[in-house]
Image: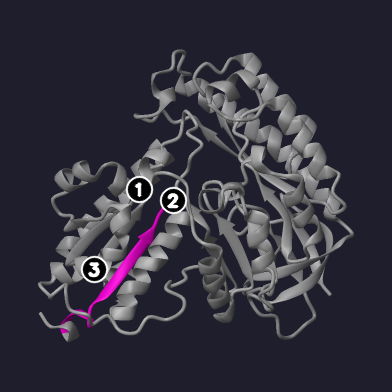
Amino acid sequence: MTKEELIAKKFFLLNLGCDKNRVDGEEMAYLLENYGIKQTENIDEAQIVIVNTCAFIRSAKEESIDYICDAMQKKSENCEKLIVTGCLAQRYYDEVKKGFPEVDAVLRLKNNDQILNVVKGLYGLDTRANDCGRYSALKRSVSTPSYYAYLKIADGCNNCCSYCTIPKIRGRFTSKPVEELYKEAKALVKSGVRELILVAQDVTNYGADLYGEPKLVELIKVLSKIRKLKWIRLHYCYPNLISDELLAEISNNKKVCKYLDIPMQHASNNILKNMNRKDTLESYEDLLKKIRNQKHFIAVRSTFIVGFPGETREDFATLKDFLERQKLQFVGFFKYSREELTAAYNMPNQVKEKVKDDRLAEIQSVQENILIENQKRFIGKTTMSVVEKIYEDGTIALRNQYNSPGVDSLIFATSNKKKIKVGDFYSVKITGLEGIDLRGEIL
């Protein structure tokens, strides 16, 4: 096969799991597109299918396997080559290779940058040939809407929570240098991005491996110098490293969204200790008090696990009480997933699935009522918001700095303006509630 014949083909890339995995996929897509192979959003048009998998918990593994099986069905139709990448490929490399004979290639995470050579090799082309075109400043094919993008500032994790597989899948915490991130961020903004969402397994630890101590505040200050960048959002701030300096930067820097995603995971000291977390119920309460004492309101999102081994009724009641008292803005819940090669896997007193299901339903109901009450604080106020979608009936969906895309609530607004554009920012007066979402008017 010639290069011309290969670039006449199309590839379909499915990114599963977290936003960090999405960035990995965007980098792989860029390598293929830079060579000349076009990406399609329709799997039925693709001769090359890439499933970029997740393997964080059992449900994620099952979803990844389901999509691989679905893609295998395409091998008898239009699909010629099927490639599996991502965390499932890393964690179960041999099992994927042996268990799915229809899969043509399996890439470990460290080999993502070899995706082009893998594709070329599958089609019999010389992988040594330097014929990949000219690289641009932004070595990513951004898959999010044009006005926001994820900036992966580090990979891996050193925290070793007893339930988590990430350190074994992605290795030690490794930061990207400030200079490299600034160039990437500047290229993203030049392409039209106005909101950068900084992601890592633990953004608060950013730079500790490179500079001897965390340098997240310094990174924020550098990124804030990019003129057309409007918002910087932080995802996954581990509570023990949220310093007074960081809170002051969030509160005082106009470009930083007044929003913190803080995975707390539980509120019972007994469970937190067994999870190998570095915090306690008391330290969480002290931190939330500090956040509320900032001069600007800061929305807090968190995640919690129910049904961790040994979780008693009293432990669960402590979690419920914590949520009812602290009234966090947004909360996500997960049932504990028993994962091999984690310390929690062999812990005694594993909680029954029925109990997990019941506790999950109960805690979600509690938080939904809290969310509705929290949303009322915005009624009558005006917030700067970005347009996410415009519906056929003229309704406009927006999101303000207190909402992260895809996980939090929206604002459904009306407007007398004739030219409203997706990705543009407008002042919105909040007039009421629509379920857990807000209603408003664009001013």
Earlier along the polypeptide chain: callout 2 or callout 1? 2
Spot occupied by residue 426 in the image (x, y as percentages of width and height) = 76, 74
Q: Which residue is mark 3?
A: 48
On the picture, is 49 further left or further right than 386?
left
Place residue 438 in its image quadrant: bottom right
Q: Which residue is mark 2?
A: 17
Q: How is the image coloured?
A: one colour
Spot occupied by residue 352 in the image (x, y as percentages of width and height) = 46, 19
User: Of the residues shown, which amino acid type is indicated by label 3?
Assistant: Ile
- Secondary structure under the numbered disc 2 in the rendered image: loop
User: Of the residues shown, which amino acid type is indicated by label 2?
Assistant: Gly
Q: Quadrant of the C terminus?
A: bottom right
Query: How crowded is the residue under tag 3: few (<14 C-alpha within 10 Å), some, or many (20+)?
Result: many
On the picture, is 390 further left or further right than 154?
right
Q: Check if residue 56 falls in the magenta segment.
A: no
Task: For residue 145, say whether it is visible.
Answer: no
Q: Is residue 135 above or below residue 315?
A: below
Q: Which residues are magenta?
A: 5-16
User: Of the residues shown, which amino acid type is indicated by label 1?
Assistant: Cys
Is disc 2 in contact with disc 1, using a CB cutoff of under 8 Å?
Answer: yes
Say the numbered circle drawn on residue 87: 1
Looking at the rendered image, the disc whose residue lies closer to the viewer, 1 or 3, is: 1
Spot occupied by residue 330 in the image (x, y as percentages of width and height) = 68, 45
Earlier along the polypeptide chain: callout 1 or callout 3? 3
